[in-house]
Image: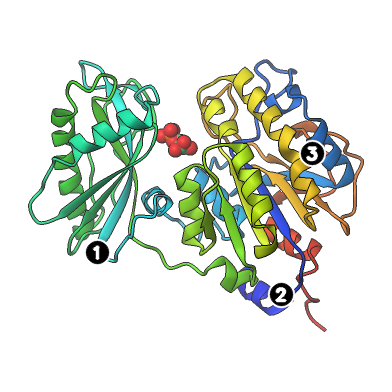
Amino acid sequence: MNIHELIRDLREPAKTKIVLLVADGLGGLPLEPGGLTELETARTPNLDACAKAGVTGLSTPVLPGITPGSGPGHLGLFGYDPLEYQIGRGILEALGINFQVTARDVAIRGNFCTLGADGKITDRRAGRPTNEKNKAAVEKLRTITIPGVELFVEPVKEHRFVLVIRGDGLGDKVNDTDPQAVGVAPLKAEGADEPSKRTAEVVNQFIAAAVKVLAGEGAINGATLRGFATYPKIATFHDVYGLKAAAIAVYPMYKGLARLVGMDILDPGQTLQGQVDTLSKVWNDYDFFFLHYKYTDSTGEDGNFAAKVQMIEQLDAVIPEIQKLKPDVFIVTGDHSTPSKMKSHSWHPVPTLLCADMCRTDEVAEFSEKACLRGGLGQFQAMHLMLLAMAHAGRLGKYGA
Ligand SMILES: O=C(O)[C@H](O)COP(=O)(O)O
């Protein structure tokens, strides 16, 4: 029996409500050994109060030492084994902008990037352009045609876009052309089987044409691709947990993840306050609420320690508004760590707190990496968090006689 079968067996209806607040890339590192992390530096009176009232721990997104992307990081938090459900980033990004992916599509996540005269990447994100600059560059990419396939290019946000290649006999076992590093040239696409070789041929032609059409777009003069994916088979959140779930996210990729597992995608606008207002507005319509907060991740990836501290403090300020709704289970965690010191995601376990009437509280009175290490949840796998959420929500019956 696997976890989803167990949950389907044990789940019981209830009127309880669960809020899962994901601060993307929450975990961090001190800049100097013995120093404080971003979370430990931030003033977080409300998160500290939640940690004191609840139970805390450290979640391991995939396995010890494994650095997850946001895709596997969130699928784990939703209770899907990230080793079993390897969903390409392309599908998540496409679903995030509500692109209607068909069985003949390969969906791919794109980055506008900056290339030096030597063809090497100098900025993987082309300076995080405005959405307007992104749209203008997408219009240029839309002029590219390749015989035998249909191409769809859609803007996402800042440096992000989606490429969908539609045709017959295409495969998604293609390597990323994004080396996820600067100072090196984008990689050539290669396919691991015949259908994927066909996809790789199209991709290499597309990237060569992209450099030509993007000339003169300033910092945007190249494109990299990653997360090639065809539409996966995956059980919905309702099918597994029997929960009516709402996703309240600003960035498309996280809407895509939620859409992939069948959550209702709400549109909170572009601000954290808009997300909290939306939560309050639909409070009576759902059992489960996934709130996503992006800026603890992007500031970490930019290596901006002070900005990440500020983003954490901004998040802390809205916690009382969420608590006013009296969630039966309130969880704050992250999908992975993104230490500013590393300017990237990392494998470090993620601070997690869970508030619920039936939780067994611990001695922890602050929300931080060090404090959560002493928490009553201990160190646990992120994919088990939903079991804890369901149990504390009174939604799991007894296992066995
Ligand atoms: O922000 C995102 O899309 C990802 O978390 C990081 O992707 P990037 O490193 O290509 O910006």
Q: Give the residue displayed 48% in from the left and 59% down from the top.
A: 259
Is residue 116 placed above or below 244 in the rendered structure? above
Please identify the quarter of the rendering in which residue 296 is found: top right
Q: Nearer the viewer, mark 3 or mark 2?
A: 2
Inspect the image, locate mark 1, and give the three-letter code of the amino acid beneath it.
Arg
Foreground residue among 391 and 344: 391
Query: Relative to 308, is 202 on the left or the right?
Result: left
Could you tell me how far apart the alpha carbons at marks 3 and 2 are, in whole angstroms? 29 Å
Please identify the quarter of the rendering in which residue 122 is found: top left
Query: Relative to 337, is 397 on the left or the right?
Result: right
Q: Give the residue displayed 45% in from the left and 46% down from the top.
A: 252
Looking at the rendering, in which quadrant would you find the C terminus?
bottom right
Inspect the image, locate mark 3, and give the three-letter code of the amino acid beneath it.
Cys
Query: Relative to 396, is 225 on the left or the right?
Result: left
Residue 340 coordinates in the image, percent (x, y): 58, 24
Q: Give the residue displayed 65% in from the left and 17% down from the top.
A: 31
Q: Which mark is residue 372?
A: 3
Ligand 1 quadrant?
top left
Residue 330 coordinates in the image, percent (x, y): 76, 51
Residue 71 coordinates in the image, percent (x, y): 49, 49
Inspect the image, locate mark 2, and give the three-letter code of the amino acid beneath it.
Arg
Mark 1 residue element: loop
Could you tell me how far apart the alpha carbons at marks 1 and 3 are, in whole angstroms? 46 Å
Crowd tier of the residue under label 2, counting other residues whose Cα lies within 10 Å: few below 14, some 14–19, many 20 or above:
many
Which residue lies under the disc numbered 2? 11
Is residue 301 placed above or below 394 in the rendered structure? above
